[in-house]
Amino acid sequence: MNDLSTSIVLISLIAGAAPLLASLTGRVAKVPLVVFEIVLGIVIGPSVLGWVQPTAFVKTLSELGLAMLFFMAGNEIDFAAIKGRPVNRAALAWLISLGAGVAAGVLLTPTPEAGVLVGIALSSTALGTLLPILRDAGETKSPFGRAITAIGTVGEFGPLLAISLFLSGRNLGPSAILLVVFVLIVGLSIWLTGRGKHQSVHRLMTATLHTSGQFAVRLVLLIIAILVALSLIFGLDMLLGAFAAGILWRVLMAGASRNDAEVVEIKLAAVAFGFLVPVFFINTGISFNLVALLADPFILALVPIFLILFLLVRGLPNLLAASVGATWSDRRATVLFSSTGLPIIVAVTAIGRSSGLLPSGIATALIGAGMLSVLLFPFLALDQRRRRPSAVPPDSSRTTA
């Protein structure tokens, strides 16, 4: 087989093997699925076995997977549940994280520009990664889950805004103007969508739910394509468009019947988490330069330093955003969950390397620390949740955020 055929077969094999491994190890330890996808990607990639090399086709699928990950994150956010105190506290905590992250980045990197990039990466939270973990743990509707959702929402949206403002290759003034125009266009679209009932659209969705038409899925892909293209035309990061597409789709589906909405969500989850998103995480492992990381003692030492900074810079400020009445176990779990990051880190480092602002070694160390955060922090956070006093159940009215 040629290189592309080999890549497709092996990536498909890993995508199928990862859930199996996760289910087998789940009896001993609850390890997030993405960890298996990344680690197996490293194993088959150039750093270990060398069976798969990075290719343009797989990279394109990976970028689609990243966009779909952010779409699903935007689509799953219930703004009515996190409005008020949860999102306000989360926004304050993120601003503190950004300032502390930039300060730490400037101290650790050779240039102020690289420090800003590192600061943005350190201020991120992997909402798209955490939502499936919270869903599997039955935490999405609990006050604790709503607090983490608010933290993750700001921890993804805030860095996206920062990327669009500071990494678009323009001066800050024009970038801010274009960002405002983009936000106004998206906001107007969401407002107009929310005012209508869209019965004809919903009827067409219903009529094609179980046919080859699949209008709902095709419409989703069209909305993502339009908003991603619009964000790129405005010189903004494509993930901002994908995230906005998820929010717009949630508003559009608000008037659909409950049964149809659930069927559509299942289909979208199948496309996202059954196909595109795993390719992103597997390709992250394939592209990871483990050899370069292990060969440079300074770069290797940065991995645990960045991992600790995730906790200090991103995690600790979010004690402000913990749900009302949270136990100390809940607070520790909040710190750990909010310190989990990877997709934004991958995006920031990719932009930094392509623009020549971020040294490749520092980018590799950041990604390595991000992968470790996904491996360690959610597992430890869930363990903390299991240790909470039985007198304070997760859905207690006393902990309402």
Image (spheres, rainbow, N blue to C red):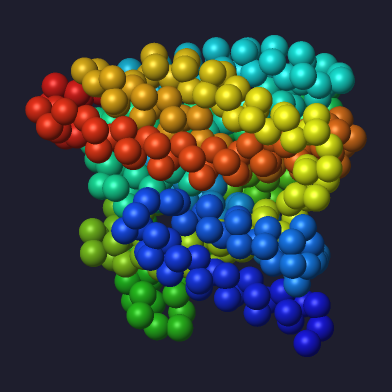
- Judge whether 387 appears above or below 280 on screen: above
Check the image and name the residue furthest to the left.
391
Query: In the rendered picture of this protein, how many numbered marks are placed on residues?
Result: 0
Q: Quadrant of the N terminus?
A: bottom right
Residue 165 can be seen in this image: no
**Looking at the image, which residue is at 64% across and 18% down?**
101
Q: Nearer the viewer, residue 256 or 210?
A: 210
Residue 102 location (% of width, % of height) = 69, 16
Left or right of 141 on screen, residue 88:
right
| Quadrant holding the C terminus | top left
Whether 198 is drawn above or below 348: the answer is below
Which of the 4 quarters of the picture holds residue 268? bottom left
Q: Quadrant of residue 116?
A: top right
Above or below residue 49? Residue 136 is above
Front-most of 235 and 143?
Answer: 143
Q: Who's the residue at 29% across and 25% down the image?
A: 329
Q: Give me the residue at 70% from left, 12% from top.
A: 103
Q: Residue furthest bottom?
A: 1
Q: Position of residue 187 (x, y in %)?
A: 51, 35
Q: Nearer the viewer, residue 191 or 345?
A: 345
Residue located 52% across and 24% down the image: 311
> Is residue 21 at least partly visible in the picture?
yes
